[in-house]
Image: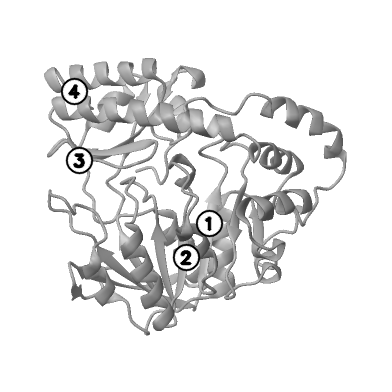
Amino acid sequence: MELHGGYRHKASEQTGKPLNDWLDFSANINPFGMPEGMKEAMIKGMDEVIHYPDPDCLELTKRLAEFEKVPTHRIYCGNGGADVLYRYFVALRPKKILLPVPTFVEYEEILTNYYGTIKKREILFGKEEDAKEARITEDRIKEVELVYYYMNRNVGENELTLTEEFLDCIDSSYDLLILCSPNNPTGKVIDEELLKKIVEKTKECHVKLLLDFSFSEFLKKQEGTMDVYLKQQPHITMVHSFTKMYGMPGIRIGYGILSDAVTKEEMKRQGPTWSVNHLAQVAGVYALGQEAFVEKTIDYVTKERTWLINELKQLGFHVIEGEVNYILFQKIGDETLHERLLKRGILIRSCGNYRNLTKDYYRIAVKKAEDNKRLLTALKEEIVCPQNVL
């Protein structure tokens, strides 16, 4: 089972199919790729690669502070969003964490790699269950308690969605609550009123709140009070990524808007000094000026997502309707769709390793119309006459 999407290299090695022949729906990247001119900006920046990159990312930090309307000391730039997450967890060193699931699998991976020993508990629709698994390594003695809140998976209005019931699970025993919005893999956004209640409850209980907004760039930008409100809360840290919207996962650049809980200096101490290379910094600065590209992408993705959802439903798939550039769906009882599409040169994300999902859940990116049509054709053929899987 793949931990992430975007595994063309492994698929190519295993099948012998050339790398560029794969149609990759497993990685949620802008269907237009990079904005026009970004490649040229990085080429111009090549003259500087004979020098060490700026360890403080001064120009990018300044531009991000202006973009986000926060002081520069609150901006931390990292080698992708995952680097920011890792440094935050290690700097904060929480002892008890609350995590609604399903959600981004890397939170648990980072915690497991750092702590080694994790005590795990589950809350199923408001009822706690005993720990079902634990991993212990010989060279680590640190321990964290990770409590999973299983979102309702029953089909209906609140399927895989946080509701006010979740508020009852937040108490002062926790050090940290992690929320991903839009959530990965569902694409769902936490309701604003509920999010405000969560913010107030965590503040009241002295619980730090990490908001992963890595896919928020695919939402229509709301110039309102919510964004200002969140940035005013001293216990909230927010994580953003350039990877998805600006089509540059191979460059690796993300950033955090830090809370009072962790300083920029503490983040820096948790990894190598030069974590963001010069070309990534150039690309980040360039991306911040591409408002028209972002609007074009949002409009296109919205249209194609709506079409894909309708087509998937007509084929009998159960679709969890999100708001971003990927779609989670289920073909009840079909656990081999991922492997069958591999034979056709198409990669989709099998979601069996997401906690609170089963092997018949799959996630696909929203790509260009011609690619989306090719995927739908393959899905239709697989449903009518599925290929055998060895």
Residue at the image position 54 percent from the left and 51 percent from the top: 240
Residue 131: assigned label? none
Judge the density around disc 3: few (<14), some (14-19), many (≥20) Cα neighbours within 10 Å. some
- The tag earlier along the polypeptide, 3 or 1, is 1
Whether 11 is drawn above or below 378: the answer is below
Disc 2, disc 3: CB below 8 Å?
no
Q: Which residue is mark 3?
A: 360
Going from N to C along the chain, the mark reached first, 2 or 3, is: 2
Q: Is label 1 in contact with label 2 (beta carbons under 8 Å)?
A: yes
Q: 10 Å neighbourhood of mark 1: few (<14), some, or many (≥20)?
A: many
Mark 4 vs 2, N-terminal side: 2
Residue type, label 4: Asn
Nearest to the eye among marks 3 and 1: give it. Answer: 1
Vertical order, 244 against 20 (above or below): below
Q: Earlier in the sequence, mark 3 or mark 4?
A: 3
Comparing 131 with 167, the one in front is: 167
Q: Disc 3 to disc 1, how far (Cα)?
A: 30 Å
Which circle's residue, 1 or 2, is located before the other in the chain? 2
Q: How far, Cα to Cα, is label 1 from label 4?
A: 42 Å
Residue drawn where x is 16% and y is 21% of the image: 386
Which dot, 4 or 2, sits closer to the camera?
Answer: 2
Numbered badge on residue 239:
1
Can you tell which mark lies on residue 210?
A: 2
Q: CA distance from mark 3 to mark 4?
A: 17 Å
Residue 276 place in picture, x, y as percent: 70, 49
Determine whether, in the image, residue 332 is placed left or right of residue 305. Answer: left
Q: CA distance from mark 4 to mark 2?
A: 44 Å
**Tag 3: residue type?**
Asp
Check whether the beta carbons of the residues at disc 1 and disc 4 lie within 8 A of each other. Answer: no
Residue at the far front: name it.
Answer: 224
Helix, strand or loop at label 4? It is loop
